[in-house]
Image (spheres, rainbow, N blue to C red):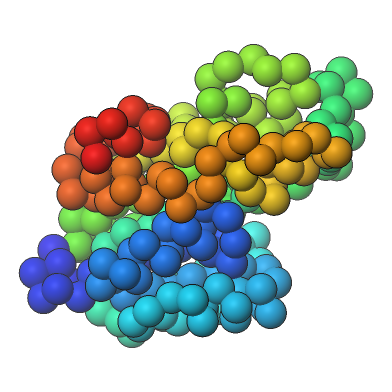
Amino acid sequence: MANIERGQRVAIVTGASRGLGRALATGLAQDGWRLVIDGRERDTLAVARQGMSGHVVALAGDITEASHRDALVAAAADLGGVDLLINNAGTLGPSPLPPLGVYPLGGLREVFEINVLAPLALTQVALPALRAAGGSVVLVTSDAAVEPYPGWGGYGSAKAALEQAGRVLAVEEPAVRFWSVDPGDLRTRMHQEAFPGQDISDRPLPESVVPAFRHLLRQRPSSGRVRLSELAVVA
């Protein structure tokens, strides 16, 4: 854990241009982490970067592309090597949410590509550095991974697959912590896309879960599933 001992902790945060990813990255930057962040929309990512203090490298790109994944890990290596990987980038899939009985298979493939294969692929690239650092991997998940909500079959089954991958990785890679983190319902663009035309202003803002996330990083529990709403009380 050389980087942590030097006070130069390094994190990669995917999907950091908006929503939860932006909130978590901003909180980490405030706490002195050196960051590598990404997002598919270059201009949106640049605006997010301007709101973050400290040393932040912003790389626009598509997490499903191997060259972009390699670039993220290489940028983290230039900062001293990754200690924390937050696999936050994802996609809801078709909106409005279709039932599984008529779910377009092309759309489902894309949901699995972005929500399962891409984060696993990035984790594979980052694993050597994470092993050396005794680092941690966050897999952002959802209660739809464990509850059978109508219409959420595509997204939920992808997140369930991601969680299972995290459980297996935790057994195979004991030097690294793997947390499947459920942030709860938040007021984000993705959540709005799940409920088109509906008012979701009653959902909390993404920034509301940052204190609980800080608590998670301080406590560093064993690998497993984490609901930030349960940590919020403690934090």
Q: Quadrant of residue 209?
A: top left
Q: Split into 4 quadrants, where in the image is the C terminus?
A: top left
In the rendered image, the vertical position of residue 99 relative to residue 60, given as above or below: above
**Residue found farthest to the left:** 5
Q: Residue at x 75, y 37 (%)?
A: 199
Q: Nearer the viewer, residue 100 or 130?
A: 100
Asked if residue 40 lies left or right of residue 26, the reply is right
Residue 76 picture location, percent across and down: 36, 75
Residue 161 picture location, percent across and down: 55, 31
Can residue 225 be seen here?
yes
Q: Quadrant of residue 135?
A: bottom left
Q: Residue at x 47, y 58 (%)?
A: 23
Can residue 120 be seen here?
no
Asked if residue 161 lies left or right of residue 132, the reply is right
Q: Nearer the viewer, residue 184 or 137?
A: 184
Q: Residue at x 77, y 23 (%)?
A: 151
Asked if residue 62 lies left or right of residue 184, the reply is right
Residue 9 picture location, percent across and down: 23, 69
Q: Split into 4 quadrants, where in the image is the N terminus?
A: bottom left
Q: Residue at x 24, y 45 (%)?
A: 215
Residue 140 picture location, percent across and down: 48, 43
